[in-house]
Amino acid sequence: MTDRLLLKGGRVIDPGRSVDADLDLLLVDGEVAELETRVAARGAEVIDVSGLVVCPGFIDLHTHLRQPGREDKETIATGTRAAAAGGFTAVCAMPNTEPVNDQAGITRAILEAAAREGAVRVWPIGAITRGSKGEELAEYGDMREAGCVAVSDDGRPVASARMMRRALEYAKGFDLTVIDHCEEPTLAQGASMNEGAVATMLGLRGAPGAGEAIMVERDVLLAELTGGKLHIAHASTAASVDAVRRGKARGVRVTAEATPQHLLLTDELVRTSEYDTSTKMNPPLRAEEDRQGLIQGLRDGAVDCIATDHAPHTVDDKKVEYDAAAFGVVGLETAVALCLDRLVAAGLISLGRLIELLSTRPAAILGLPGGTLAPGAAADVTVLDLSRRHKVDPARFHSKSRNTPFGGWTLKGAPALTIVGGRVAWGHGR
Amino acid sequence: MTAPAYPHRHLLGIEPLEASHIQAVLDTAEALREVLDRPIKKVPALRGKTVVNLFYEASTRTRASFEIAEKVLSADSLSIATSTSSVQKGETLLDTAKNLEAMNPDMIVLRHSASGAAHFLARHCRSAIVNAGDGAHEHPTQALLDALTLRQRKGRLEGLRVAIVGDVLHSRVARSNLWLLTKMGAKVTLCAPPTLMPPGIETLAPTTSRIEEAVEGADAIMMLRIQQERMTGGYFPTLREYHARFGLTEERVRLAKKDVLILHPGPMNRGVEIASEVADGPYSVILDQVTNGVAVRMAVLYLLLGGAEAA
Amino acid sequence: MAPPAPFRERQELMDADRLSRTLSRMAHEILERHPDIRGTVLVGVRTRGVPLARRLAARMKEASGFEPPVGALDITLYRDDLTTVGPQPVLKGTDIPTSIDGRTVVLVDDVLFTGRTVRAALDELIDFGRPARIELAVLVDRGHRELPIHAVLLLERVAGPRPRTPARKRRRRR
């Protein structure tokens, strides 16, 4: 028996192929079969998507699924359900689990669990160094073969320039991209928010934006030196974006992502929320100039994609004094709606550009299947409802965790349907 | 019914207060000061009210001052200090507060090393919260007692020139005083080595790294304590150089107004931020500060616990 | 917000002339009762009792050549309804300029009503020392006492409405 699904009457946008038209999309056996003005059902299950936008499935390059080790915060099952409900058809799982995903055995275990319980595709990212300790290279060859799509020591910046150089060089041999969490550790020591006037008023220790930009500059220069492929995780400052922009202009193989929280919020929120720990993340929320710099980067291409940095934490990790609270916010279930309302509807970027940022570019950066609706491509599809108004209610998240600064926001535009491999992984109201 | 003079449920900091609220606390403290000179230093105002002093950092002065204020106003009080509580057994601030809440205290006075700890308690507890110092954020009652002392000696706060000198970066006293004095119309100049000047503070007050510039023509100088560990933290090279460049010496005091007042939240490091001759000189108002400290804390207790519960 | 007080017709109890004459009479009465004027202290209950005490002291000086010391008592901290009244009452402060030990204290207020203010004033005075005697001088007695208190020196007795204290509160105090 074959799987046949026909999405009928939608507006299809596939930026990679410059498609923006009302088309029917037929998915057969996990692949895109036909994309035409009218496709006959011929026994396929038909979903009427008129009035909705159909696009290649969204891919999150930066997700913390917490499994193995911290299943109290998130599991592959709950994290991927959250992804599906947020309109993502694939997530890249950061390796800072317990144990760290620094060898093929762990990678395979993650993939097995994902095949068993995952609602969307899971692409594991391996560690740059063993245990993410920054001392010895992890086994990239084995991890690549087991299914890793990139390497990163996310959460633990690679402090040593020499180690970073070796990683960029060695990763070339396996066509792996090195994703760096850029943070100069001595400048960020003890910090729980952005350095600046707000931190001064609140009496909290701040990490200067320069601490991030220094490392971005270093990494870009090392990528240039080695010819390795570099991806900057969660860029948060205007200076970081500028460093990437200049690197690209010189032909360095560098890409960068930004998160909705850094695109939409500033450190002022720490003050107005009166130390609400759901505003605590790393990198921290920055100043307005930095936020503007990130938006500029989205518009001119210095920033390649939007990623969530979905970082679930338990209530106990967050319901403590600000200094003691864990860094990070959940994002899978809010990212797409936030971008539709506050970036697209606000007129900062076009809908086509957003789809590029969430699908086309992420797929291209790591060479993942998807990111296109070309016939023969993986049948991963995200359907958007641009008119649906809703209020962010953390109590209804599929994620195990609720740590979001966006609770109570009213947003217009939301995912309507998430299709993975030709099957519906999630649908609004389904 | 008229609007209450101090319309807040808590005292978490000076920053959210308006000038009229600060005025109300100072006027109330002034009216209450007399009680401390009576033969029987006790009035029944807060009979039946329970106050918990929860101190996560050692602080003899502030805690004693709150305890005296509570006793003078006849509140029932209970003090818990880190060394004797379950804090060291790993109980979280929230758990401790929730356990205390079972005793249904009307107020919790909190001293904690984390900035925002008082806000945290205010969010999760029913009691009125008084911030007795949170990290490098605020120490509102210290600023109020400094202001009361200044107002008594100078007759006003508006238009006074005040220099705040020392480790501004780590000082909650500096922040609370800066907010308070600015709101009351005083002209504040901040002075510290650039390494101990918090970023962005220049949006709130003029800054300088020359102490001579800061104290020139000043009506009052507030000295901040320099903690020895700041030296090892790399903020300045030696205590000797600190004293030479930023210490308050007789010579520098002479640049200020003749009747300059010198305030220090204590305990002082003689020979570091302040020369002994200055510390023991005629400008010192330390004893006033002790009495005013109790009066201000009585005022805060009275304003938060006197009157009917806010709806 | 509390509901507005029911409208009551203003009643002029005393014009300026009459007040002046009666203060003189009261001053003389105090002097008669306490020939040792140097052992007497006048204490006005804030707010209206304080100017009255001052005027009384001035009359006593006219009559005797000696002006007794005048104090001011803010009874707020001794009120039995402090934690049930609306917002915190504004404190004006107490000022007793001399020791009251062994002296006669004449407590001065404008109106005597439920007696609760006087109760608070007595408690506060006693925290300042041990006077030989305390007397109470008021201009007007409106009746409706809730405590066993009466004025020694009194100028007018006026029948007025009952206190407006809600019954619930009064029950609690019993």
Image: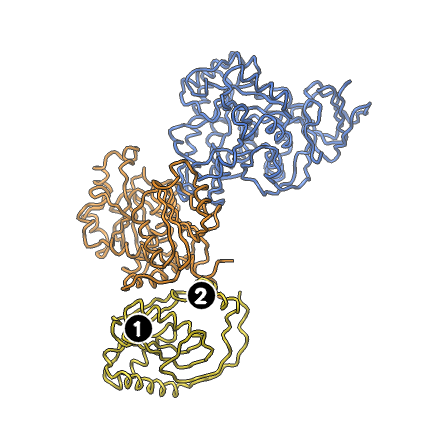
Chain colours: A blue, B orange, C yellow
The amino acid type, in three-letter code, at marker 2 is Asp
Letter of the chain that mark 1 sits on in the rendering: C
Q: Which element carries disc 1, helix, strand or loop?
A: strand
- Mark linked to residue A95: none
Q: Within 10 Å of the Cα at label 2, are there few (<14), some (14-19), or many (20+) other Cα atoms?
A: some
Q: Within 10 Å of the Cα at label 1, are there few (<14), some (14-19), or many (20+) other Cα atoms?
A: many
The residue lying toward the viewer, choosing from B299 and B78, is B78
In 3D space, how far apart are the residues under numbered discs 1 and 2 (Cα atoms)? 24 Å
Residue C173 visible (yes or no)? yes
Quadrant assignment, res B134: top left
Residue beneath the point at 20% across and 42% down: B271
Tell me: residue C33, above or below residue B80: below
Letter of the chain that mark 2 sits on in the rendering: C
Report which residue position mark 2 lands on.
C81
The residue lying toward the viewer, choosing from B252 and A60, is A60
Report which residue position mark 1 lands on.
C71
Residue lying furthest left in this view? B277
Q: Position of residue C33 (x, y in %)?
A: 29, 84
Number of numbered callouts drawn: 2
Q: Position of residue B77 (x, y in %)?
A: 37, 52
Tell me: residue B38, above or below residue C57: above
